[in-house]
Amino acid sequence: MTREQLIEQIKSKRSFLCVGLDPDIDKLPEFLLAYEDPIFEFNKRIIEATADLCVAYKPNIAFYECYGIKGWISLQKTLEKIPKHCLSIADAKRGDIGNTADRYARAFFAKESAGMEFDAITVAPYMGEDSITPFLNYKDKWAIVLALTSNKGSYDFQFLTDASNQHLFEQVIQKTNSWGNTSNIMYVVGATRGEAFKAIRHYAPEHFLLVPGVGAQGGSLADVCAYGMTKACGLLVNATRSIIYASRGTDFADKAREEALALQQAMEKELIKAGIIQ
Ligand SMILES: O=c1ccn([C@@H]2O[C@H](COP(=O)(O)O)[C@@H](O)[C@H]2O)c(=O)[nH]1
C-alpha cells in the first residue's frame, strides 16, 4: 500500500486505528476451541467486526510462531482475511546482517517465497543499515523502525545521550531517515511517550509513526495527537488487548467493535480538529 493510499483510507474511514491481532489460546472465548483453527476463527471474527473502523491490522508474529507450524498456518489464513484496503503489518521486529535480512524480507513480503505478502514489517535498527535496506527494496512496502518503544526497558538504551546530548532514539531516526523516505519508512513510537513526540517530529516531521500503547498500556490518544499529528495525519495508533479481549464470551466480536468504534470516534474528532477532514 502506498503512502497516498494510506492517507486516502484515513480520510475516508475517518480513522487512524490499527487493530492488533495477538491471539492467546488461553484467552480465547471457550466456544472457539471446538473449531479446527481457533486462532483463525477468532481473528476472522475480529476482522469482520472492525474492518470498516480501522486502517491497519498488526498481527504480532510471536503470538503465532509460538504454536509452530499450526501458528504459521493461522497467520497465513489471517493475512488472507485482512482486506486490501487495510495496511497489514507483520510485527516481527526483525534485524540481522544483510543476507539474512534479505531472507526475512522475502519471508514477509514475497508471496512466492513463504506464501505471505504483508504491506509492512517492524524492524530493529541495532544492526544498522544493511539490516534495514533489504526491506526497502520492495515496491510499496514499509519498514517500520523501532525508535522509542512503549515499555519500561526503553529507558535502558533509547534515552542514552551522546556528547551533543542527542538521545539514541533521535540518532536512530536521523540516521535511518537517509536510507529511505516517507513512503517506505515509518517509526514505532510508544503512546506512553507523549512527552517525546515533539523531539520525534523534529527528526521525522512527515513520517508515519506506528504508535502502540493506547488501551492496555495506558497511553493517551489526546497527547499523541497533540504532539504527533501532521498535516497528513502521520499516525497509526494501535490497540490490541483492549479491543480483542473486550469480552471473552460469545459476544466478543460485538464488544471488540464497540471498543474499536470508541477509538475511531475519538480519532475522527482529532482529524476534524487538525483540519484533515471536515
Ligand atoms: O513499543 C512497542 C512496540 C510494540 N508493541 C506491540 O504492540 C502491541 C500492543 O498491544 P496492547 O495489548 O495494545 O498493549 C503488542 O503486540 C506489543 O508487542 C508495544 O506494545 N510497544
Image: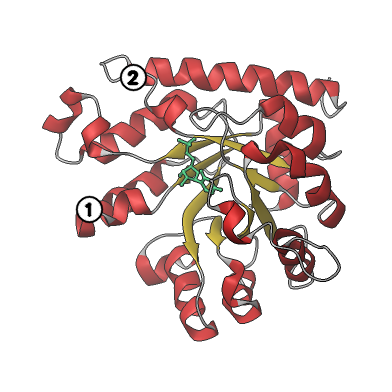
The picture places residue 80, in percent across and down from the top left corner, at 40, 47
Q: Residue at x 45, y 41 (%)?
A: 82
Which mark sits nearer the N-terminus, 1 or 2?
A: 1
Identify the secondary structure beneath mark 2. Answer: helix
- Relative to 93, say whether 85 is above or below: above
Q: Which numbered marker is on residue 67?
A: 1
> What crowding class fits label 2: few (fewer than 14 Cα within 10 Å), some (14-19), or many (20 or more)?
many
Q: Residue at x 28, y 20 (%)?
A: 248
Q: Residue at x 40, y 28 (%)?
A: 244
Q: Quadrant of the C terminus?
A: top right
- Relative to 162, say whether 45 is above or below: above
Using the image as rendered, state which of residue 155 and residue 10 is in the foreground.
155
Q: Quadrant of residue 16?
A: top right
The picture places residue 266, in percent across and down from the top left corner, at 67, 19
Q: Is residue 277 left or right of residue 135?
A: right
- Relative to 49, say whether 88 is above or below: below
- Amino acid on which disc 1 is placed: Tyr
- Amino acid on which disc 2 is placed: Phe
The picture places residue 95, in percent across and down from the top left corner, at 51, 71
Q: Which residue is mark 2?
A: 252
